[in-house]
């Protein structure tokens, strides 16, 4: 096995170990509760970037560092902060609407989890995914030595038809809404890291399907 593969696997084992071992899990929970945005940045910067590395491994049949990996990790970290805020915003908002009788169900359990996931993925996810597609394209161009990159060039290079027909119309209803429903049934302290793991898992699943 390549050195990068060993590092990837060991990193995953360490992360799982932190969550499994009671002492380290307690520290994780405390830090997440006290510093939600910083921890959101760290969780997504690490796990989602690991997902990109795994995706490349599946596609190329060898471990390879993504182009502009540091930039990608920073972007994922920024998205982690954004997602941390949005999770709380939509969960509290849906609960408030249910309490006031403006949405069906009681503000708790499956009803709250499903509707939070539904509205978040319909309202927020397309914007976030589009932003990430733009930043990915920009990083690809910059890493390939292209300078003075104009926004119009980036936008023209994106397959927006594929983005809408596959990313929005397939992954959102068939993966993200069900997956995030489960996430929102978890305790608050584990939701963001679960979402980061899902980002890693989806990258691997899609790469595996494409490699078939």
Image (cartoon, rainbow, N blue to C red):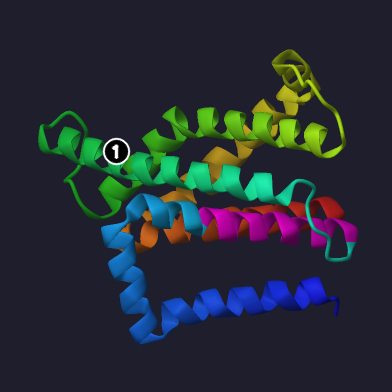
Q: Position of residue 190 (x, y in %)?
A: 37, 63
Check the image and report above or below for 77 versus 172.
Answer: below
Q: Is residue 212 visible?
A: no
Check the image and report above or below for 58 versus 157.
Answer: below
What element does badge 1 sit on?
A: helix
Q: Is residue 21 visible?
A: yes
Q: Residue at x 10, y 32 (%)?
A: 100
Q: Which residues are magenta?
A: 44-60
Specify the quadrant that holds the N terminus.
bottom right
Q: Give the number of marks.
A: 1
Check the image and report above or below for 94 versus 12.
Answer: above
Residue found at the very far left of the displayed protein: 100
Asked if the magenta segment contains residue 101, the reply would be no
The residue where tag 1 is placed is 89
Asked if the magenta segment contains residue 48, the reply would be yes
Side of 152 relative to 23 (left or right) = right
Side of 5 relative to 125 (left or right) = right
> Which SS does the magenta portion mostly show?
helix
Q: Residue at x 66, y 46 (%)?
A: 72
- The one nearer the camera, 142 or 177, is 142
Side of 90 relative to 2 (left or right) = left
Q: Quadrant of residue 183?
A: bottom left
Q: Position of residue 124 (x, y in %)?
A: 45, 31
- The one nearer the camera, 178 or 163, is 163
Q: Position of residue 193 (x, y in %)?
A: 45, 60
- The one nearer the camera, 139 or 161, is 139
Specify the quadrant that holds the C terminus.
bottom right
Residue found at the very far top of the displayed protein: 152
Q: Position of residue 73 (x, y in %)?
A: 62, 50
Check the image and report above or below for 29 versus 184.
Answer: below
Q: Quadrant of residue 2?
A: bottom right
Q: Residue at x 54, y 57 (%)?
A: 198
């Amino acid at each position: 096995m390549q050195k990068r593969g060993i590092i990837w696997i060991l990193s995953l084992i360490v992360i799982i170990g932190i969550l499994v071992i009671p002492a380290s899990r307690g520290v994780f929970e405390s830090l997440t509760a006290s510093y939600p945005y910083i921890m959101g940045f760290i969780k997504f910067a690490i796990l989602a970037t690991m997902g990109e590395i795994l995706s490349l491994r599946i596609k190329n049949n060898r471990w390879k560092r993504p182009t502009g990996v540091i930039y990608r990790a920073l972007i994922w970290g920024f998205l982690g902060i954004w997602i941390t805020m949005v999770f709380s915003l939509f969960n509290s908002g849906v609960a408030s609407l249910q309490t006031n009788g403006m949405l069906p169900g009681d503000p708790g359990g499956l009803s709250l989890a499903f509707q939070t996931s539904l509205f978040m993925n319909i309202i927020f996810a397309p914007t976030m995914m589009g932003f990430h597609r733009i930043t990915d394209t920009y990083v690809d161009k910059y890493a390939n030595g292209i300078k003075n990159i104009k926004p119009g060039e980036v936008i023209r290079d994106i397959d927006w038809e594929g983005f809408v027909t596959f990313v929005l119309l397939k992954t959102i209803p068939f993966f993200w809404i069900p997956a995030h429903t489960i996430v929102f049934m978890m305790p608050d302290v584990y939701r963001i890291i679960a979402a980061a793991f899902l980002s890693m898992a989806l990258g691997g699943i899609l790469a595996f399907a494409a490699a078939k």
